[in-house]
Image (tube, grey):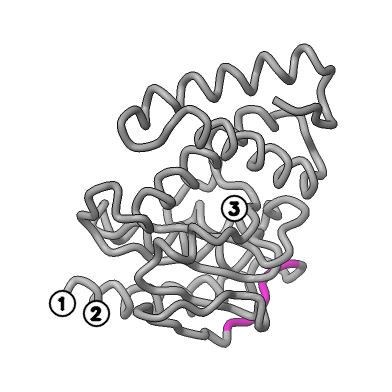
Amino acid sequence: MTRLEGLPQHELTAQLLRITDELADKFHGVFSRETVEQFVEETYQLLNANATVKTHLATLTARFAKQRLTDHGRAQGLTKVEVPQVLFICVHNVGRSQMASALLEHHAFGKVAVRSAGSQPSGSIPSVITEALAELNIPLTQAFPKPLTDEVVRAADVVVTMGCGDSCPIYPGKRYLDWEVADPVGAPLNRVREVRDDIDRRVRSLLSELLGD
């Protein structure tokens, strides 16, 4: 591992090596240890560059690196693809894309794989977003802002953008949708509910199309 900023070097190295060991075991036969190590280190760097609170950075690195390796395997045809995958993108990945991801995951019951990302991820998910989803019994306790990476776009069957501009790469064979949805960040709860319900209608319609209902 190269020297990274954040934790004391010996503690950081130990944590990243532990993550690498666990993921190398999980993806044994799919990726080499060198590939896993590269993804873990790069993932830490990506999150460390954008995180405002770094207390749980190692845990988030483990989760995001696992997701990225899963998507890389899917995109490269190295793992079995059983369900369609949808990627939601907004600017900071703390509002619209997080709501859409949580709602689709809630309604899909595992029949669709869901991802979200931000073209410029920053900050944290506002409590009003969490509260609006909690009203539908949808917890958002595990969510965090994630940067848009190449493999997550390549792995997606459907890419839904919500106000992220032209930052999303375009690949053939994918379905691209642009939803004009109001930004709920900074809005009062009653307005966030309206945005939530708008996204929910769109998500339900998309899910019906994907599953052929």
Q: In which quarter of the view is residue 53 placed?
A: top right
Q: Element type at marker 1?
A: loop
Specify whether 94 is left or right of 86. right
Query: What type of secondary structure mainly makes up the magenta span?
Result: loop
Q: Quick check: is 184 in the magenta stretch?
A: yes
**Which disc number belongs to residue 64?**
none
Q: Residue at x 46, y 58 (%)?
A: 115
The residue sitting at the left extreme is: 213
Q: Choose the circle earlier in sequence order: 3 or 2.
A: 3
What secondary structure is found at the residue carrying circle 2?
helix
Q: Decide whether residue 86 is among the magenta residues.
A: no
Amino acid type, label 3: Thr
- Is label 3 in contact with label 2 (beta carbons under 8 Å)? no
User: x, y percentage for residue 200?
Assistant: 42, 72
- Work out whether 113 lies above or below 49: below
Q: Which residues are magenta?
A: 181-185
Residue 192 or residue 162, whichever sits in front: 162
Measuring from the top left, give residue 152's x and y in whole percent: 48, 59
- Residue at disc 3, secondary structure: helix
Label ID, residue 130: 3
Q: Residues within 10 Å of mark 2 (few under 14, many from 20)?
A: few
Give the Cα distance between marks 2 and 1.
5 Å
Amino acid type for the residue under numbered disc 1? Gly
| Quarter of the image where one finds residue 40 | top right
Q: Return the mark for residue 209.
A: 2
Q: Position of residue 192 (x, y in %)?
A: 62, 70
Point out the image quarter for the C terminus. Answer: bottom left
84 w.r.t. 36: above or below: below
